[in-house]
Image (cartoon, rainbow, N blue to C red):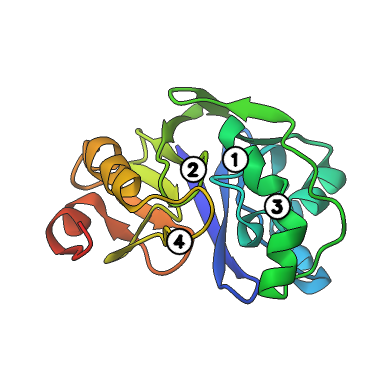
Amino acid sequence: MLQLESFVFNPFAEHTYVVYDDATKECLVVDPGCSNAAEESDLFGFIDSHRLKPVLVVSTHGHIDHILGNAAVKRRYGIEVAAHREAQADYMRSEQQSQFFGLPFHGEFELPDRILNDGDVIQVGNSTLEVISTPGHAQGSISLYAEMEGWVFTGDALFCRSIGRTDMPGGSYEMLRQSIKERLFRLPDDTEVFSGHGEPTTIFDEQRYNMYL
């Protein structure tokens, strides 16, 4: 079974997740948003103190607050960064996004090394996560579903009682609603939702109480 640890990084209070197999010590780093040396130290300190073995960085989408730490994690552990092909458009706008939001830019936001597609399965130790395409907040947005654990990592698609903004390039309100209703709401009601910002929730609660859906 997988375990997880979450961190809140950068001025946007973005959630970075370390998803790990406690038996094999393999882990994924999902959306590393660390924006300074202190935040990097928090992330690396947890990984190293638990003797984890990072195997992959996964970006749920390419917005700047979710990829700020990609280069640092990749450099420290010698691993690849994976994202949906269509997320590359936002990667290419990284410097522009950094300037707009006043976030640091170090010229290190190269394109992802590995392309993920809908239905792909990512192995972490003895467990797996399924890639679910959930566009609408951004081009190439994906969610990660851990069926055995009953978790889904939704990036900025679905939040507790809210949904991702759709007014940035590649956003579409109707597409996002469709992604949530047709892809995420087909998951079991008790699936725990871990979003890119805010508190955890469940599929059951969002089906019934999310005013945007």
Q: Earlier in the sequence, mark 1 or mark 2?
A: 1
Marks 4 and 2, how far apart at CA:
15 Å
Q: Quadrant of residue 52?
A: top right
Marks 2 and 3, how far apart at CA:
15 Å
Is any part of residue 26 visible from this angle?
Answer: no
Q: Earlier in the sequence, mark 1 or mark 4?
A: 1
Is any part of residue 208 visible from this angle?
Answer: yes
Label 3 belongs to which residue?
93
User: What residue sits 33% from the left and 53% below the top?
Assistant: 173
- Left or right: residue 58 compared with residue 77: left
Closer to the camera in the image, 143 or 121: 143
Marks 3 and 4, how far apart at CA:
15 Å
Q: Is residue 79 above or below residue 162?
A: above
Crowding near the residue tagged with mark 4, few <14, some 14–19, many ≥20 C-alpha atoms within 10 Å: few
User: What residue sits 27% from the left and 48% below the top?
Assistant: 177
Label 2 belongs to which residue?
141
At which x and y percent is residue 11?
63, 77
Label 4 belongs to which residue?
167
Q: Earlier in the sequence, mark 3 or mark 1?
A: 1
Of badges 3 and 1, the one in the foreground is 3
- Left or right: residue 104 compared with residue 63: right
Q: Secondary structure at mark 2?
A: loop
Which amino acid, mark 3? Arg
User: What residue sits 40% from the left and 59% below the top?
Assistant: 164
Marks 3 and 1, how far apart at CA:
10 Å
Marks 1 and 2, how far apart at CA:
7 Å
Of badges 1 and 4, the one in the foreground is 4
Marks 1 and 4, how far apart at CA:
16 Å
Which amino acid, mark 4? Asp
